[in-house]
Image (cartoon, rainbow, N blue to C red):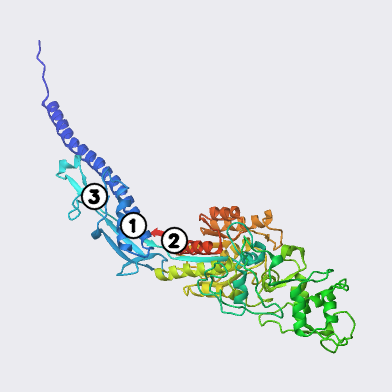
Amino acid sequence: MQGMVISSRRYRRRAAVIVQVAVSSTVVLGMGALAIDVGALYTAQTELQISADAAALAGAAELAGSEDVQVAALAAADLYAGLNKVLGMTPAVYPEDVEYGHAIPDPETGRFLFEPADERWDAFRVNLCHLESESPDDPPAVSIPLTFAQVFGLTNTELHAQSTAVLVPRDIALVIDLSNSMNWDSQTRFWDRGDGGYSNLRDIWCALDGPEPARPYIPGPEDQTEYATDTGPTYGHMTEWGDPLEPDSYNPASDPGLYYIRRYRQCTDPKVTANLQSVGYSDDEIAILMGSSHDSSSSHWRYRVSVCIGLATWNSGRPGGHGSGGDGDNRVESGELTWIPKPSYRVDWYWSSGYVNWMRSSSRHEFRYRYGLKTFTDFLLQSEPQMNETNNLWSTPQEPLRAVKDAVQVMIDEIIDLDSLDHAALAIFGTTSNREVDLTDILQDVPDRLYQMQSGHYNRCTNIGGGLAEAIDIFEREGSLARPSAYKIIMLMSDGKANIDANGNSVGDGAYAACQYARDQAEYAASQGYRIYTISVGYYVDRDLMGEIAATGGGQEFYASGDPATYSAELQEIFATLGGKRPVSLID
């Protein structure tokens, strides 16, 4: 049998394979180490960056506070860093890990750059590289153990992540309701409203001839406000304010400050008789003025009432009468009257066809036909509120508008104190809307202008949709001063009773078309990234619409209620909160 011959070449091939396997195994193990450890490093670095971003955002948000912002920012950064684990470990932020600074806009890119600063910070930087430790003086680094890479002598690696967040400057469009309902809380219509509110009508009367109320105006019972000892202006025989408008005890019928002179009725008010006698009218003239035999003539009735309350002097020409020049008959006629001077603030209304005639309307309720300082002041607020009718109501404490004015001032003070880069604008609406102050960094311009405006300033309805459209136009019109890098914020204050549609038609309080116009504008604003906050105030308020607008705009609805003193304080707190409610954003 012939023996087998084995070739040495086969042995060489087998040896080569062994060498190749040995070499490739090392490569494969190295690649495995690289894949597994690099994957772990990537995961850890991603989680660490998330933790750093959370810490930076939380810390920057605290910079909007007013006291100990460094302590608050560091604590918030540490808290939020620890809430985001890194491969199960708890990162922590220590004083040496943070910087405080300013956000400086880059004019070329529109982005913000971080610049360290010693005070008034609006930017916060975190360099996250430590873990939570019981020894804060020597905290451990964020160190990730390596598994397979130990083959190459690598046992661990240290990680860090940097993040910077800023309080983003805001372009704020304040949209204020200046419809006539913004003085309703001061009117007689709600003197007995039953919810704890009360009318500050006496303070309105006192302020008609000055001084303008303090800033802030502090409402309260008639005998406790800054006008408690002010006597106010008088007109003819209307010289006594009368009883306080206290909801639990006031009765217009027994108020000594009111004269009751009804059309087609004999006047029996002894105060009227005494006043006419004191002026020097004869018994014959007084009988005519107190009687109603010629009241079928509305002008005769208006004129005799005007004489009875001292707004005009009757030169009747009757024998033994008060004055000459009249035709001597028993009618009170226009050519026989000498009127007292009209107040300096009167622009376009008259004693007789205005105030006297207005008081016979059934809508005056229990004050119908009752003449005096209360109802005259009420006449100005309800019937002649526009600037082209009565041009000084802006300097009186109309409620709830005065509370809104003071709250806006509080907000502006808060923003100024923060020394932020915020800009603000003022838009108002009644039946129409107007831009009163364009976006400006001279923030005091906004409350200064608002303080000079009154309820029903231009016109009287409630065009909420138009007000929102005006705010949008502030941001978007050609030549707008809005800044690309600034957050766009709309703050809408109203009682929510929309009554003007998209075509400018008056359609009634709460009508669908008027509300839908407001909704449409809110939806468009939201689509452009503009955030809307709403502030509801007033006795006659529609919170449903205001809440819907805020929700659509990604903001929040606030509500101030109760008596004027309560909602004044609440409004100031709300606007102070909004003033400091600054958005934060990461810049690296």
**Marks 2 and 3, how far apart in space?**
31 Å
Element assignment for label 3: loop
Q: Report the front residue among 349 and 378.
A: 378
Of the two numbered discs 1 and 3 in the rendering, the one whose residue sits closer to the viewer: 3
* Residue designated by label 3: 132
* Residue designated by label 2: 581
Q: Is residue 174 visible?
A: yes
**Marks 1 and 3, how far apart in space?**
17 Å
Q: Where does residue 301 sit, x and y in percent of width and height?
A: 83, 74
**Quarter placement of the C terminus:** bottom left
Are circles 1 and 3 on residues that touch, CB within 8 Å? no
* Residue designated by label 1: 56
Residue displayed at 16% across by 42% down? 150
Residue displayed at 64% across by 72% down? 457
Relative to 481, 231 lies left or right: right
Question: Which quadrant of the figure has residue 343?
Answer: bottom right
**Marks 1 and 2, how far apart in space?**
17 Å
Looking at marks 2 and 3 on the same chain, the residue that comes earlier in the sequence is marked by 3
**Quarter placement of the N terminus:** top left
**Type of the residue with mark 3:** Glu
Looking at marks 1 and 3 on the same chain, the residue that comes earlier in the sequence is marked by 1
Q: Is residue 430 visible?
A: no
